[in-house]
Image (cartoon, rainbow, N blue to C red):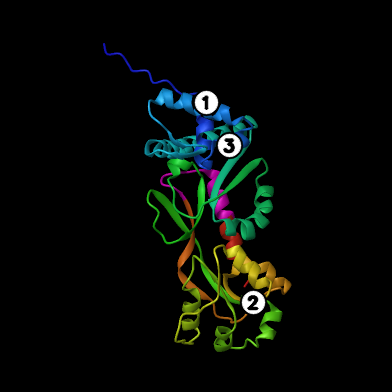
Amino acid sequence: MSKSTYTPIPSFAALRAFESAARHGSFTLAAEELHLTQSAVSRQVKDLEAMLGFSLFRRNGRRVALTDAGSGFADDLAVDLERLKQTVTRAVAAGNQKKSLRVATIASFASRWLIPRLSEFEALHPGLEISLSARTKPFNFDEERFDLAIHYGVDDWPDTQMSKLCSQEIYAVCAPDFREKHSLSDPASIAAAPLLHEENRPTYWADWFRLMGHTTSHPPRGKIYDQLSMTIAAATAGLGSALVPHYLVEDELTQGSLVTLADTPLITNNAYYLVTPAGASNPMTHAFARWIKTKVSRRPK
């Protein structure tokens, strides 16, 4: 009869010390985060290296850098610790006799549209605990263990079920004072005034001007922001005109802090999708999907 090989498991303290040091690239910062001394973190990492049989860091004075083996171990460990955190979260919810729903979503969608409406859904389902996490790209549901994702892009996420939530209507907007200051009345005057660009959508202004029948000899120029929330804030502050999804500026348009510059929206090839793991069947997920679709369908123009 063959004997099974026993693989010892390092202490959680050692794994946590290594994960923090790898993330920060510093034993000192890891010690501050974990409320330990720098020497304690260093000792735990050394003990972990001794157990694994290879070096995790290259040390150069007070500076440390991951070895190739250490980098691979850090990536795998980060996934494992995230799974452990999710398992504990689910266990706590189960212990409280509450149901939980984990939703991955785009940060701008969550902060500016979903969260202000979420109390309505929670009122319909008392006892349900909803947690939101920001994700911008497709992920492996088996590894991250979300119940549902709200995804912006195209219908191409392997091993999932995708249901279209809505197309994205992009409108040109600006602050009222900015419109008056630059006499914005047509695409030509808009093109001549300061424009605001969102880094992940660099062609939108060119696409919009083309839609409006306005041609220019050079690509539209202007300030660039790497977050849509920054672009909206800049437009509200009167720094320029911006192209933004209608649903993200509903409050500003209603309050009058932003105005639209044209009635025709730019419709892109991308859309919003509700995404669930292939074959999954969760009553709370279905209830959430039904609710959010009704909220989108009733979105005011």
Say whether disc 3 or disc 1 marks the residue closer to the N-terminus: 3
Front label number (1 vs 2): 1
Give neighbour class at mark 1: few <14, some 14-19, many 20+ (Cα, 10 Å): some
Q: Is 283 within the magenta?
A: yes
Front label number (3 vs 2): 3
Please state the extent of the stretch shown in magenta in the rendering.
Answer: 276-291
Taking the spot 59% from the left edge, 83% from the top edge, the residue there is 193
Report the residue marked by disc 1.
43
Q: CA distance from mark 3 to mark 1?
A: 13 Å
Considering only vertical position in the picture, is 234 above or below 5? below
Relative image position of residue 178 (x, y in whole percent): 68, 80
Q: Is residue 272 visible?
A: yes
Taking the spot 55% from the left edge, 80% from the top edge, the residue there is 264
Name the amino acid type tagged 3: Thr
Report the residue marked by disc 3.
28
Give neighbour class at mark 3: few <14, some 14-19, many 20+ (Cα, 10 Å): some
Name the amino acid type tagged 2: Cys
Question: In which quadrant of the rendered image does the C terminus lie?
Answer: bottom right
Seen in the image, is 182 located left or right of residue 8? right
Q: How many marks?
A: 3
Extreme-right residue of the structure: 255
Q: Are marks 3 and 2 in contact (CB under 8 Å)?
A: no
Give neighbour class at mark 2: few <14, some 14-19, many 20+ (Cα, 10 Å): many
Report the residue marked by disc 2.
174
Q: CA distance from mark 3 to mark 2?
A: 46 Å
Judging depth in this view, the residue of 248 and 289 nearest the camera is 248
Q: Secondary structure at mark 1?
A: helix
Relative image position of residue 139 (x, y in whole percent): 44, 48
Q: Is 202 within the magenta?
A: no
Judging depth in this view, the residue of 48 and 111 nearest the camera is 48
Question: In which quadrant of the rendered image does the N terminus lie?
Answer: top left
Judging depth in this view, the residue of 225 and 261 nearest the camera is 225
